[in-house]
Image: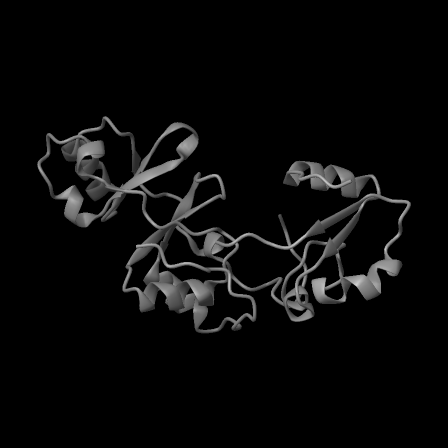
Amino acid sequence: MPTDGENNNCPRAGDASRKDAVTCRLKDRVGDVRDRAKAAGWDLAVVVGEDRVVLGVLWSKQLEMDANLTAQQAMKPGPSTFRPYVPIKEMADYLVEHDHDSAPITTSDGRLVGVLYRSDAVRLAASANTCVRKMITSSPA
Amino acid sequence: MSKVIDRETVVEMVKHGAQLVEVLPAKEYMEDHLPGAVSHPLKQLDQEAGEIDRDRPVIVYCWDSA
C-alpha cells in the first residue's frame, strides 16, 4: 500500500529491484536456464512455482552445474527474501554486511517482485535518509 | 470485538469511513504511515483512546517484519 510521511519519496527495495529477472520452473534443465540467463545478461535465475512464488535461486555457481540437472536438483532452496517496502539504505546496509550480491524481493506471500542488486542498492542509498524504523528484523541463514 | 482483516478490506473500509490508527512510536509514524492514519502510540493509547470516534469502525495496525 502507498504510504505518507517523511520517507514518502525514499526509494524502496521494490523500486530499485530489476523486474526482468530470469525465472524458471522446478523441472527446467539447468543447461536451458543457463542459456536463457546468459542471453539475457543475468548471472542468476529465480526458481518459481505457481503465481511466481519463489522456491529457490540458481546463483551463478548453480547455473554452472551439470546441464542435465533439473532446477529443483540444483537450486539453493528457500533464499532470504525481502519486502518491496524496505528502505533502500537498510537494504544496502544488509547486503553489504552479509556480503550478498543480490536478493530476491517478494510480496509477503512470496511472489517475486524483482531482484535487487547490491550495486543498485548502494548507489541509490548514497543519497537516501537513514530510517528510524528497521524493517529487516531477522538474519536468515 | 476485534478481527483481522486483509489489505483489500482495509481500503474498502476506509473508503466507507473507517478510522486508521497506527500504534507504533511517533517517530516511526512520522517516517511512514498509511494515508489518512492517525498516530496513537501503544504506550499512550489508554490516555488517547478518547480521541477516537467510537461511532465509526477503527482499524488498528502496526507492521510486519520484512
| Colour option used | one colour
Q: Residue at x 48, y 73 (%)?
A: A127
Q: Where B21 sits versus A88, above or below?
A: above
Image quadrant holding the N terminus of chain B, namely: top right
User: Residue A61: percent from the left, percent from the top?
Assistant: 15, 48
Q: Position of residue A125 (x, y in %)?
A: 44, 69
The image quadrant of residue A19 is top left
Of residue A122 and residue A131, the one placed in the foreground of this image is: A131
Report the residue that reaches farthest toward the right: B55
Residue A79 drawn above or below residue A99: above
Q: Position of residue A26 (x, y in %)?
A: 26, 29
Question: Which quadrant of the structure image shows residue B52?
Answer: bottom right
Point 30% across, 55% down: residue: A141
Q: Is residue A59 above or below residue B47?
A: above
Work out whether residue A94 or residue A114 is closer to the camera in this orientation and state it.
A94
**Left or right of residue A96, residue B28 in this image:** right
Q: Residue at x 83, y 39 (%)?
A: B16
| In the image, residue A45 above or below residue B46 | above
A65 to the left or right of B40: left
Who's the residue at 37% across and 43% down the image?
A20
Q: Is residue B16 left or right of residue A73?
A: right
- Number of numbered labels in the structure image: 0
Q: Residue B31: give x, y in percent of width and height.
A: 63, 66
